[in-house]
Amino acid sequence: MIFGRSERGKPPVEPVTLKILVAGGFGVGKTTLVGAVSEIRPLRTEELLTEAGRPIDDISGVEGKHTTTVAMDFGRITLREDLVLYLFGTPGQDRFWFLWDELATGALGAVVLADTRRLEDCFAAVDYFERRSIPFVVGVNCFEDTARYPAEAVRQALDLDPGVPVVLCDARDRESVKEVLIRVVQHAMAHAAAAREAVTT
Ligand SMILES: Nc1nc2c(ncn2[C@@H]2O[C@H](COP(=O)(O)OP(=O)(O)OP(=O)(O)O)[C@@H](O)[C@H]2O)c(=O)[nH]1
Ligand SMILES: [Mg+2]
């Protein structure tokens, strides 16, 4: 074997790496999603939710939750031999908004995770990406004890543009999360192609 070449004599593929943000409201499952698909041990920045934080940290709806992300989650997934995604999960609480611009720099696209019991919690994330023209898909994290709504109903409730994909998913399930990530990449590619078209015509 020649150094730097694979056994079959094919030169190794230098993968394209893309940065994807995972955003959404507090406790919607962002850290869970990154952990479910990452092929490296995800970097987490979890801190305990404490009694002192109670007036600020609204845990209604996520009473079983004991920790919260205070900076970011980081993970990596190889979607194809030549396509690697770096996943950056944002903190869910409003008091960490100041970190978002830094996290969003260079992002190709985003997943906005939503919980249908608290849809309003993801308005801010939807707004953020719309304003910056960062392509995003909405992933509805289907917690098992909640009513299912069709994707169209979620689209209407969030007042999304018709082109924004809405995907039902389970943040704990690797295959389900992979599907969401593939949709983000496809959507971002289409978005980039449309932008190029607009420049050249
Ligand atoms: N039943 C169920 N529980 C889930 C699902 N996704 C996440 N959870 C649970 O919901 C809680 C919140 O998950 P996290 O992944 O920490 O949420 P987060 O969005 O990262 O939260 P912050 O970083 O604090 O905003 C955890 O206790 C998870 O185990 C899901 O799809 N179904
Ligand atoms: Mg988190």
Image (cartoon, helix red, strand yellow):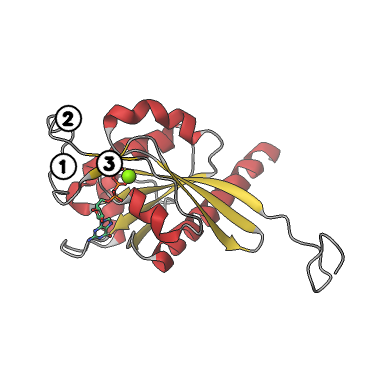
Residue at far right of view: 2
Residue at left 28%, top 50%?
Answer: 156
Could you say which is closer to the camera, residue 149 or residue 125?
Answer: 125
Task: Determine if residue 187 is in view.
Answer: yes
- Whether residue 190 is visible here, answered yes or no, is no
Q: Where residue 145 appears, x then y in whole percent? A: 15, 63
Numbered mark located on residue 155 in the image: none
Q: Is residue 38 above or below residue 56?
A: below
Q: Which residue is mark 1?
A: 59
**Displayed quadrant of residue 144:** bottom left
Residue 155 in the image, given as x and y percentages of width and height: 31, 52
Q: Which mark is residue 56?
A: 2
For disc 1, the neighbor class at 10 Å (few under 14, some 14 to 19, many from 20) is some
Query: Can you say whether 7 is above or below 164 in the image?
Result: below
Residue holding disc 3: 68
Q: Circle 3 sits in a helix, a strand or a loop, which is it?
A: strand
